[in-house]
Image (tube, grey):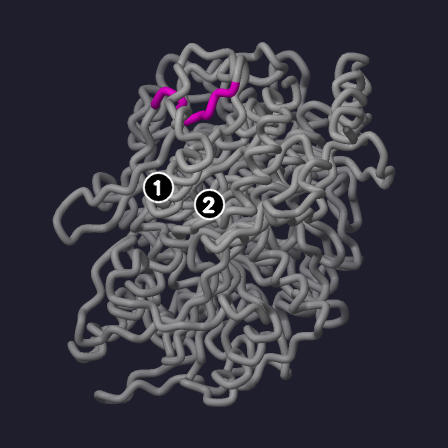
Amino acid sequence: MRQRIVLCLLVASIAAGVLTQAARAEVTAEQVRQSIDRGVKYLKREQRRDGSWQEHPTLAGGVTALATLALLNSGVPADDPQIRDALAYLRKIPPKFNYVVCLQTMVFSIAEPTADALLIRRNVKWLEEQQKRDKANEKFRGAWGYPEGYGDNSNSQFAVLALYEAHRAGVPASMQTWRLAQQYWQRAQRPGDGSWSYKPNDPGSGSGSMTCAGIGAMIMARDVLDEGDARVDGDQVKCCQPHEEDESIDRAMNWLGRHFSVRVNPGDDPRAFLLYYLYGLERTGRLTNQRFIGKHDWYREGADWLINLQEDISGFWRGTGLGENDSHIGTSLALLFLAKGRRPIVAAKIRHGPQEDWNHHRRDLANLVAYTEKRWQRDLTWQVIDVDAATSDDLIESPVLYLGGTQAPELSDDDIAKLREYVNRGGFIFADAVCEGAEFDRGFRVLIDRMFPEPDHRLHLLPPEHAVWSSEEPVDPRFVRPLWGVDVGCRTSVMYCPENLSCYWELARPGRELVNEKKYPAEIERRIAAARAIGVNVLSYATNREPKYKLDLPQLADSAPEDSVGRAKLYIATVKHAGGWNAAPMALPNLLRYVSGELGLRANTDAREITLSEERIFDFPVIFMHGRNAFRLNDAERKRLKTYLERGGVLVADAICSSEEFANSVRQEVAAIFPDHPLERVPGTDDIFSDKYGGFELKTLERREPERQAPGGPLKANVRQVEPELEALKLGDHYAVLFSKYDLSCALERHDSLECPGYTRDDAARLGLNVVLYALHQ
């Protein structure tokens, strides 16, 4: 029988250790984690007994503040004993030097802003007093500098950073201070190429470090000063207000893209201040929400370079130039790049035509993500992505893609194919008819029909009991907006609101009450709160509140090496039936890719679909069956399946999203075919849960169980450590049917869902691999 020949070849391949050699991998999330951990341990070892680090002779407190800032951003909590010692030391230092005050303010604003509110306010007042405001020296008006100097872009950068963090902590500087700072940076930009130098009108060219400083300062000033692209006029909300693009930032980004490097600081003296430049580069990428600067994946390239620069034994970094040759300063700057730059991306805004229709409210997603940060109590970020220029791997870095506009979105067939693949790989699309654009509504519905032409993938109105409405916070019933959805795989993977949400996200600017004494009317505040609640609910539903760090992306679907040879491969077919047989189409291919990636076993991931009545069922040593609805086999199917199992074939099955209807149908059909051999639970001590066949020891697994922690409260995914559980039909001395009533498919497909009980992604893959290996050895 053909299946026996194939099986022998496969097992012989494993026994001989014929593994496909993988190409050298790029920098990984684990390498970044280890690098950060080593840098953190180095700084902690170097801290002195009084809570300080060895200081610069004339800048007492500066190195300590910088090291503390790096540790906080690297995940060391504010209540860590060494952070507490550092804070106690810094609280004793009065404001005297600009760099020290700025770094000290950033530390206080991040660590314990409520406890240190008076010190933050003191420092803000001091910084405002130190700002250059002499009208007779217009070139430096609005800058900061050394006491004996006019001002420079380095001191000014740190001042803006400090005032911005203080603003976020609830201690604002005056609008006059921000306006003067914004005007200074506008004047300081080099008119020819859009870069910045150390000082306005410096001879020579601009530098990478100062251009990053200028971009960051301009964006932070704009965030505080700009009213945004939506207005409140009396009791009326005016959305989609006209705005001008900031050409100064675009020019600077173009310069940076042309001169991009992570190995040198572009400019007159590229050997100096590399780590200082990378600290600014991280801020530029994060504040502009760009994954790419020019054609460069700035974080991936920078992380790779820094990991190679790290000292092997002690784990420190040391650069060249003033300050960076101090390993405490060098390590702190390197950690700030690695830690802040890898913040999890929770969503990306799709750039699309016509023209700039994708960006009517430039801070809509930014404000929603800022609110989500507070709800989830973790640092997050977002980005802008051009589908036309992106690959499928680029898209999957963002768990949610946001698509908005007023006109029908202009996306090519290739773009739509990428978006479909993105959803099939576990991505989520969230769309919004900005300013309730009728053309967008019509265009988006056509787009969905092109993306998912299957009849069971139609937009439908989500009912009140859908999990999205309880995934994070309640929505005021008076201001609920309709959400439409497309069910793909194990969850609703596309959601669409035909009524404007982004306008109200734009109005929900964090800290607006600090800079604008005019309050919104209560009715508008409630509308803002409702739109914001819908947005955070969708993000929670789509991500399970578990967005991944940069580089820490799902690899399951991409782990199999390319292999065009068709012979001596493992083929597993999916069984077609009436119970939603294709609700999770990527589950089996992903499992086979995982098998191939883990073992080097040659597995074919192309779709092989059969009905149980077909003769060619005997071509497959293993067949796979899953679903989420009840089904019933006919007599011919039962007869063929019985023969297949009695000849040694193995049926592997699982209930998508732990569907009881599907599980009951599997049990009933097995009982109908083998009345004397019902499905029974596999003992937890069985070899199938061990590494006997080349898999994993599975003493316990993680299983997600939806739980509402309070009546009417948000839905939570409670993860429990449990004994692995399978049901099986035993014929002779082997299992002929292996069935999991708990979901494997949703996890394998990466369509994790709050309302879907089942094994977590990694453990579903491990259990699936063990089952496949067991089946191959029968």
- The vertical placement of 599 against 521, above or below, is above
Can you say which quadrant of the picture contains the N terminus? Answer: top right
Q: Residue at x 47, y 71 (%)?
A: 431
Q: In which quarter of the image is the C terminus?
A: top right
Please state which of residues 731 and 620 is positioned toward the viewer in this rendering.
731
Secondary structure found at label 2: loop
Q: Nearer the viewer, residue 116 or 464?
A: 464
Tell me where residue 250 appears, x and y as whole percent: 66, 69
Location of residue 429 in the rendering, given as x and y in whole percent from the top left corner = 50, 63
Q: Is the magenta stretch mostly helix, strand or loop?
A: strand
Q: Which residue lies furthest to the left in this view?
A: 711
Packing grade of label 2 (10 A; few <14, some 14-19, many >=20) is many
Name the kind of residue labelled 1 in the image.
Asn
Quadrant position of residue 173: bottom left
- Kindly report the distance in space between the C-alpha atoms of the residues bearing marks 1 and 2: 34 Å
Name the residue located 82 percent from the left edge and 38 percent from the top edge. 563
Highlighted range, magenta: 722-731
Q: Mark 2 points at which residue?
A: 547
Residue 3 as seen in the image, left or right of residue 490: right
Judged by depth in the image, the label closer to the viewer, 1 or 2, is: 1
* Local secondary structure at mark 1: helix
The answer to whether residue 104 shows anywhere in this view is: yes
- Residue 316: % across, % down: 61, 21
Please say whether residue 495 is one of the residues in the magenta stretch: no
* Residue placed most toward the observer, 113 or 623: 623
Badge 1, how many Cα within 10 Å: few under 14, some, many 20+? some
Mark 1 or 2 closer to N-term? 2
**Residue found at x 50% / y 67%:** 457
Rendered position, 492 above or below 37: below
* Residue 318 image-quadrant placement: top right
